[in-house]
Every structure is written in C-alpha cells, then in structure tokens.
Image: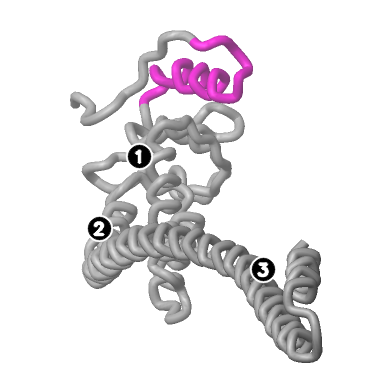
Amino acid sequence: MIKCVLLSTAVFLFMICPGTSAQVDLEKTENRMKSAIQIESQAQEKVENWTAGKEDLVSDIRTIQTTNTWLEYQNQKYSIYINKLNQQIELLNVKKLEARKVREGLEPYLEKEVLVRLENYIASDLPFYEEVRAQGIKDIKNTLNDPRGTLAEKLRQVLSVLEIEANYGKEVGISNVTLPVDGKETEVTILRFGRVAMFYISLDGKKIGRWNEQARAWEPLPKSFEREINRSLQMARRERTSDLIYIPVGAMKP
C-alpha cells in the first residue's frame, strides 16, 4: 500500500516537473521513499520480534512466580516439619535419660532385692518342686550376669519366674517322691493345696502325713484323716466330683 502511494506521488511529481531536473528530483524522492519504507519495515519487524519475545518473557515470569510461591509454601511446611522433629528429638532425649535412670536403678534392684527375696521365700516355702524352682533361680542369675543381655531380657526372665511362683499358689499339685516314713524310705504321693498345706499318702493308702510348717518337717497324721486325704487325692486326680473335705491345716490340737 505504501509503495503504491509513493509510486503515485512520483508519477504526479513527474507530470508537474517535466525534464531532466524533474527526473533527478523524482529519483531522489523515490530513493528517500524506498529508504523510509525499508526503515519502516525493519521497525515493524523489530516490533513483531519484541512482541513475541515479550510474551515469552511474561510466560517465564509467571512460571518463576508460580515456582517461587510453591517454594515459599514448601519452606513453610519444612519449617513446621523441622520444628516437630526437633520436639520429637528432645522428647526422645528425655526418654533416653529416663530409661538410663531406670536401668541404673532397676538392674541392681532385680539382683539385690527381687532375687534375694525370691530365694529366701522359696527357702521358707513348702518343699515342692525343689529342683525346678532351683533351676528358675539359676536361670535368673545367669541372665542377670550375662553382659550381652538387655535390661528387657533380664526383666522378662525375672517376671517369668515370679509368674510361675505365683501360679503355684493357685494350683493343686500332685507328685510322687520318696520320703522317710517310720524310719524307712517310702514311695508316697504328695498332695499340695497351693501354698496352704501339703500331705503325703503311701501308695497303699494306709500311711498319711503332712508338712509341719512350724517344725519344717514331715509328720504322720492320725488314721481319722485317712478317708478325707484319700478323697482329696481322688478329686485332685478328677476321679470323683468335687466336694467339701475336712483336712488339718495349721497347728493341731494336742
């Protein structure tokens, strides 16, 4: 369009100013017009390039702003996470110190208090399962003296033996042993009622006796208790239904 206007202008000037001088002026004018067109074209191209570059730049800026917003959000979240982790670390350090204090106090307590009391208690208790109970004490000592053992293992071993000892007091136990009866070794059946009383019955059922806690020795019982002791043994063996029984517990009247 611009070229058409310039050409029309040139023709018009040629018609007004005929001759050589007019032709020279027309050529100059046409050259200036061409130069102006070229400059305008270059400027238009630069504008178009700048517009395209501007859009890319705006898009990059928006991307950077979005990324920056996300990073700020992440930084806030990580700050919260770090604070919580620091709090948990402080709590774990406190628990670690408490666990160390517990260990420093618990392990000596298990060995010097619980074990000693348990040994004394078994020694003064009714004489039953001596080998088994002695092995339980030995197992505790081995565990407590094991340098590789953890406090949890040592505590578990002690509690296990204590639980077994506690269950002895709730059961009716039956075992066969050899005892000195009337001056000679006799095979008998031991009938134990928890930790309340222990009785013996000879295999023929004719000799009965009990453990005298005060004298710490076995003593014979009168024939009058023979029936009740035998009935008790039958009930313990589930050979007859449970029923009331009358057995001597504690000191007997002379």
Label 1 close to label 3 by CB (< 8 Å): no
**Front residue (pair 214, 186):** 214
Q: What secondary structure characterizes most of the magenta part?
A: helix
- Type of amino acid under label 3: Glu
Dot 2 corresponds to which residue?
A: 117
Considering every residue shown, the one lying at the far left of the view is 254
Residue at 43% x, 57% y is 156
Q: Quadrant of the C terminus?
A: top left
Dot 1 corresponds to which residue?
A: 211
Residue at 62% x, 70% y is 47
Q: Position of residue 163 (x, y in %)?
A: 41, 45
- Type of amino acid under label 2: Arg
For residue 138: magenta?
A: no
Q: Earlier in the sequence, mark 1 or mark 3?
A: 3
Dot 3 corresponds to which residue?
A: 48
- Mark 2: secondary structure: helix
Q: Is residue 137 left or right of residue 17?
A: left
Residue 48 appears anywhere in the view: yes
